Structure formats: C-alpha cells, structure tokens
Image (cartoon, helix red, strand yellow):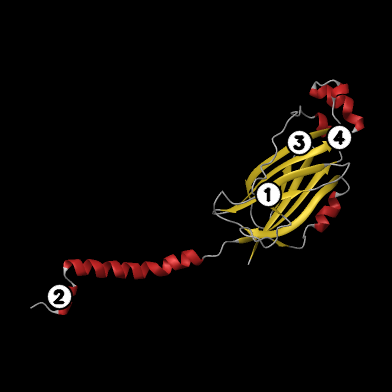
Amino acid sequence: MKTLANRLLSAPHALLISSLIMASLLLPVLVKAESTPVPKYKVEVIVFEHYALKGWTEERWPEEVELPSTHKSTPLSSKGVSPLWMRSRTNQLNAVEQKMRNSYRVLFHQTWSQNAYKSKKSPTVLIENDRKGGSTFLGTVRLYKTRFAHIEIDLELEKRIPTKVREAFAQNQQTPLAELPSHWRFSLKEARKIKPGELHYIDHPLFGVLIQVHKEK
C-alpha cells in the first residue's frame, strides 16, 4: 500500500505541488512590482522671448505652423487630479529669471510636481499665457520615465511683428508689405533625455525654454 507521502509525490500530485511552490516564490515579486509607486518629479519651466530683432530675418518662416495637440492635456489649474496628481511647487529659478530680464522678456514661469509614467502615452501638461497686445503662446510639456527621465516640449508662439523689421521681414518672407499681418506664429518642438538637477535650454531664434526637473521623494 502506498503511503500518503508516496501518493502526494506521484506524478500528478508532484506537478501540483511544484506549481504551488513556484507560485509562492513568485508572489512576493509580483506583489512588489504591483506596489512600486509611480515616480514623481518637480518640473520648473520658463518660457521667454528675445528682445533682439535679428531672429526675424535669420530664415524664412512658414506662414502656417502646426498647433500643439492639446487633446486630453491637463491644465496646470487641475491640481490633485488623476492621472498626473499635480501639485503647485515653489520656483527655484527666480534668480535665473531676474538675470534674464535684461535680454529677454519672460512670458511664463511656473513649477509643479507630477507623476512620471513609463509609457510614452504619458499625459501632457497644458501651459499657456494670455497677454493682451503682447506675445501669446500655447503648448504642452510631457514628462515620462523609462530608464531615464525624458521631456517633450511643443509650443506655438504668436508674436507681433516689430515696426522696425516689418519691411525687412516682408522681403525675407517674399510677401508684399501691404499684405503682411500684424502678428506671426512660430513653433518650437523638442524631445530630450533630462537628468534631475540639470538646467536645459531649448533654443529658437525668437524665443526659448528653460526647464529643470528634480525627482521627489
């Protein structure tokens, strides 16, 4: 007669026991993976435009630019809302902004914290300003985390054509001066890997972006 131990160690029972043992070994790993929190980063962005006029005629600018895709973007006013769970944070680049004001006009400077997902389908944050009579911009910032943090910027700026360069700009654009509009639109798109603490400069002849991220504990 087979003992209970022998019956348990027979082929079907041995396979079942082996499966249970493997499952018990893998369970802590699966639980740990599921419970790993989404990394959170503090993001600080400064958008500025140049006072210098040479950028207007450095190249021929397209008459139409593609607007940033703001579909399903999360406005900065949406604090504490899934999936980004954004929070307001204090600016750390105020001294940098102050130094910039001699050569540039700052259009936007804000700081927030947000979740950074691994997927490239990570949501975007909507940023914009509304300066009546001045330059206005609309755009998105997307932060995601693979092995490293990555940032994507997509901005559209509408800027008044300065009186001093209207004639030269019209010639450069091969457009009759009488048909030249009062404002022109420009776009800036950039994607790059970004290390926490590094200050990144995204350049354009007429405007630009400074961006810095810090991983939050």
Callout 1 environment at 10 Å: few (<14), some (14 to 19), or many (20+)?
many
Q: Residue at x 83, y 57 (%)?
A: 95
What SS does tag 4 mark? loop
SS at circle 1: strand
Distance (Cα) linking label 1 and label 3: 17 Å
Left or right for 6, reference 151: left
* C-alpha separation, residue under disc 2 versus residue under disc 3: 79 Å
Dot 2 amino acid type: Asn
Q: Is residue 138 left or right of residue 114?
A: right
Residue farthest toward the right in the current orientation of the protein: 164
Q: Are marks 2 and 1 in contact (CB under 8 Å)?
A: no
Q: Which residue is mark 4?
A: 53
Foreground mark, 3 or 4?
Answer: 3
Percent coordinates x, y for residue 152 in the rendering: 65, 46
Rendered location of residue 27, percent (x, y): 39, 68
Q: Amino acid at mark 4?
A: Leu
The residue that disc 3 covers is: 186
Q: Quadrant of the C terminus?
A: bottom right
**Within 10 Å of the Cα at label 3, are there few (<14), some (14-19), or many (20+) other Cα atoms?**
many
Mark 3 and mark 4: span between their CA atoms?
Answer: 15 Å
Q: Position of residue 51 (x, y in %)?
A: 87, 40
Instruction: Identify the image quadrant of residue 3.
Output: bottom left
Q: Amino acid at mark 3?
A: Phe
Q: Is residue 120 left or right of residue 50?
A: left
Q: Earlier in the sequence, mark 4 or mark 1?
A: 4
The residue under label 2 is 6
Residue kind at label 1, given as amino acid type: Val
The residue identified by callout 1 is 141
Name which of mark 4 and mark 2 comes first in the sequence: 2
Q: Secondary structure at mark 2?
A: helix
Tell me how far mark 4 sits from mark 2, CA to CA.
90 Å
